[in-house]
Image (tube, rainbow, N blue to C red):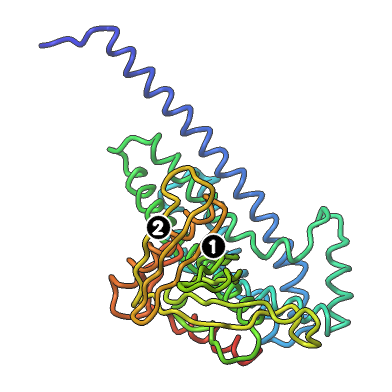
Amino acid sequence: MLLQPVATVNTVEEQRARWERKRSRTAKELVETEQKYLEQLDLVTTYFVTILKAKGTLQPAVREAIFGLLESIHCTSQILLLHLERGHLGLGLEGFCQKLELYGRYAENLEQAKKTLQEQVKRNKAFCRFKKLQESRPEFLGWQLEDLLPLPLQRLHQYKHLFRDLMENTSPDSVEFQHLAKAVKSVSEVSQWVHSTVRSHENSMQLLRIQKLLKGQKTKVLTPGRWYIQEGWLMVVPTKGEEVKRKMFFLFSDILVATKPCHPLHPLNSDKFSCQAVYPLTQCTVDKVFGHTQSQGGLLSLSFSHKTLLLMSSNQEDINNWYLNLTTAIKQLKARPTLVHQKKYLTEQPVSSREAHTVQKMCQDL
């Protein structure tokens, strides 16, 4: 029978002891933060949802639009905390993972919930008074309803790190390790869902902002599947002996839009831009004419089927960003036969019906 050296045994035992201490600290943090999270959710469900149901201050459809799945998420948190406090981590995580979809669906509705809440505060005097009264309660500690609605998404981010820390300090041979591994995987997947939802909304806001910046409705920026990348001033160098012209460019995942500012004395469009040209990136190749070294600025050559565009900037970092974003956008676009592309700013996923509906709604609101 072979005996392990005493030093090796002690080292292994010390490592296990360190893991156990870290695991205990993380488990304690999970319980304490879940208690705090539940207390904050209680503020919304007790002082808003339950009372509003009884009073009828908001129409059921409006109340649902603002609070949505918050009651279901609150209930899920209650059950999880009950298991955690009893030391039943595996059982708690098993049930929790089955309800994680609630967080993704909640994220999809959050921006609409904020918008509906804002509208009711402006238009519904009875609700506005009720809201201020509830928020003045000492239990709220200065919190407003607007601060509390995003809490589930913030908590989802915390779950991701807490579950991973627990898993890393749990023996792979234990049953709890399997539950934790599944929880980490599930939370990561829903976190990605939430991240994509947030990015999609932010992109839609950028498209809407630029659409409003352009004079008239001839140039349609709001298009499903289109992603905003960059904007800025560049100098257009003429191929013949004309003057260098300064123009504002907007780069998207499928097109480059060249504009010039409207006349500053125009009664309606003084703060807008007039579209000069729309260049499809599917037909574009980009070359850096100069600006490869630490020079002052640089010059890009953009070749299209019937035109070559020379763009210059005196800022080295600026021209490098344009070159990188243009080449990346073209590469991603040419890798796919359609306009459906998203990955970071061009993440490769099909356009959802929700996104298409959002864009159509924005077009109607313009």
Q: Residue at x 61, y 74 (%)?
A: 205
Does residue 295 appear left or right of residue 71 in this picture? left
Q: Name the spot of residue 83 as percent of width and height, x first.
A: 51, 50
Does residue 150 appear left or right of residue 84 in this picture? right
Q: What residue is shown with label 2?
A: 289
Q: What residue is shown with label 1?
A: 76
- Please tell me which residue lies in front, 260 or 356: 260
Please tell me in which quadrant of the rendered image residue 175 appears.
top left
Q: Residue at x 61, y 63 (%)?
A: 74
Which quarter of the rendering shows the N terminus? top left
- Please tell me which residue lies in front, 275 or 4: 275
2 or 1: tag closer to the N-terminus = 1
Q: What kind of residue is marked 1?
A: Thr
Total marks placed: 2
Q: Name the spot of residue 244 as percent of width and height, x first.
A: 57, 68
Q: Which residue is drawn at 83% across and 80% down?
A: 122
Q: Residues within 10 Å of mark 2 (few under 14, many from 20)?
A: few
Q: Name the spot of residue 221 as percent of width and height, x first.
A: 54, 82
Q: Which mark is residue 207?
A: none
Which quarter of the rendering shows the C terminus? bottom right
Mark 2 vs mark 1: in front: 2
Q: Up-down: is 309 above or below 154?
A: below
Does residue 23 appear left or right of residue 5 in this picture? right
